[in-house]
Amino acid sequence: MLPAIRKNVSAVIIPQKHLESAIEANQFALNHYALAISGRLCGCDGDLNLYEKTTFLTLFPYFSQQHLGLLKESATDSDSVYINCKRFNKFSNDNLTITARFFARLFNLAIADDSLNVMEISFLEKVSSMLGLSKEFLEKALEYHFIDSIKFEKKFVNNDGVKNYYRRQITKLHPDLFSENNVLSNRIKNKIVWLATERMKILNENYSKSLS
């Protein structure tokens, strides 16, 4: 059984290691399909950056610095995403809990640089479908990122740098950044535009209060 599982770990080539059991071999495969998918997420909007590398190692403690080269290689491999998702499902036994946790880590990896662009959202939308998750998983994550997370940002509104903070938020999360594209499905695009609009309202209120 073990040789067969090792053979299936073909999406990412890693140094061979001794695997004690079929369970460990299964986890070994699962983690490395996760690496391949994560790498492509990091690369879908450009080069792998420091924020993404650091966040990846935090979210996926199974890996270490020596695996970052593999993460970078996966960043340019757009052809294998579908098969990697299918293999992830196979080795997770289509376990929804495992898949949902992995998707949550992917989302946190996408916002590692404190922003979320159309290409990243598009990738997450496609991957959620490939992993067998409903669009609600992505929608809930988007709701947190755009709306619920603001309560943790209130500490900024009375700082001397409030204007700079406000401008940074506008450049990252303005509704127009998401409304004028044909990459996202209409459902997700409409959801994001609504969330971004609501976020701008809250930011504008906080901005006005901080200057009053």
Image (cartoon, rainbow, N blue to C red):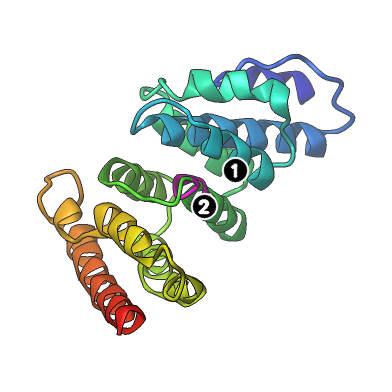
Asked if one can make out residue 183 in the rendered structure from this viewpoint, the answer is yes
**Residue 15 spot, x, y in % from top left:** 74, 14
Establish if 6 lies above or below 30: above
Residue drawn 46% across the image and 45% down it: 113
Instruction: Say which mark, if any, is on residue 55.
Output: 1
Residue 65 relative to residue 161: left or right: right
Crowding at mark 1 (Cα within 10 Å: few <14, some 14-19, many 20+): some
Q: For the residue labelled by badge 2, is the local secondary structure a helix, a strand or a loop?
A: helix
Q: Name the one closer to the observer, 41 or 153.
A: 153
Q: Please state the extent of the stretch shown in magenta in the rendering.
A: 108-112
3D distance between C-alphas at marks 1 and 2: 8 Å
- Residue farthest right in this picture: 20
Q: Name the one closer to the observer, 77 or 85.
A: 77
Residue drawn 25% across the image and 71% down it: 200
Quarter of the image that includes the N terminus: top right
Crowding at mark 2 (Cα within 10 Å: few <14, some 14-19, many 20+): some
Residue drawn 54% across the image and 39% down it: 51
Contact check, label 1 and label 2, Cβ < 8 Å: yes
The amino acid at mark 2 is Asn
Dominant SS type (magenta):
helix
**Residue 30 spot, x, y in % from top left:** 64, 37
Establish if 148 lies above or below 112: below
Q: Which residue is mark 2?
A: 108
Establish if 154 lies above or below 162: below
Q: For the residue labelled by badge 1, is the local secondary structure a helix, a strand or a loop?
A: helix
Establish if 47 lies above or below 125: above
**Residue 173 spot, x, y in % from top left:** 28, 58
